[in-house]
Image (cartoon, helix red, strand yellow):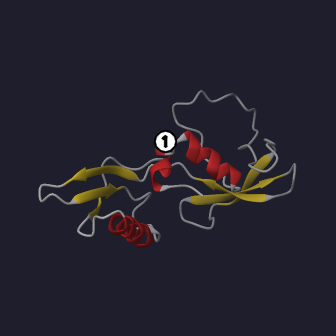
Amino acid sequence: MIGLGDLGVVESVAVADDGNLEVAILPTFLGCPALPAITASVREVLVRCGHPEGRVRHVLAPAWSSDRISERGRTALAAHGIAPPVPSDAPEPVRLGLGTPCPYCGSLATRPHSAFGPARCQSMLHCAGCRETFPLMTAM
């Protein structure tokens, strides 16, 4: 659905001093339960691409934020029913109390449903237009 690059999790890919490829990844938040699976997947790709000695390094700086999600990533999230957060530098229209656009019907008649979503980096919203409940990527 969305690659780690489009999610903004890959900080860098470089050749280390010992000549091995090293991928630095940023966790979306401390304690992310997906981090071991993400690390294993990156290692598998390194091996498959001919870098069996390649390493994955977790870095905390710069801190990941939802601003790192690419436009392609935002489009993929929305296509799969996850409302991406608005970039912090995007001009924010005055919405007069209207909510986040629904990824299903585009309605702004949305409201918070639950602060807790399917992952710790998501909350749940409800759309009054199509009556769907959908996750929102929270800006961290």
Whether residue 18 is visible: yes
Whether residue 83 is visible: no
> Would you name the residue on which mark 1 appears?
67
Task: Pick out the residue farthest to the front.
Answer: 50
Q: For the point 77% across and 60% down, which residue is it?
A: 133
Q: Position of residue 92 (x, y in %)?
A: 63, 30
Q: For the point 46% across and 71% down, which residue is it?
A: 33
In-image side of 117 versus 57 (left or right):
right
In-image side of 26 versus 19 (left or right):
right
Give the total number of marks visible in the rendering: 1
**Residue 23 appears in which quarter of the rendering?**
bottom left
Residue 130 drawn above or below residue 44: above
Depth check, front residue: 73 or 138: 73
Depth check, front residue: 57 or 90: 57
In-image side of 3 versus 115 (left or right):
left
Q: Position of residue 65 (x, y in %)?
A: 45, 47
Q: For the point 36% across and 49% down, which residue is it?
A: 63
Quarter of the image containing the N terminus?
bottom right
Q: What residue type is disc 1 on?
A: Asp
Mark 1: secondary structure: helix
Q: For the point 52% across and 42% down, which residue is it?
A: 70
Residue neighbourhood size for the residue with mark 1, other residues' Cα within 10 Å, grouped as few (<14), some (14–19), many (≥20): some
Q: Position of residue 114 (x, y in %)?
A: 68, 62
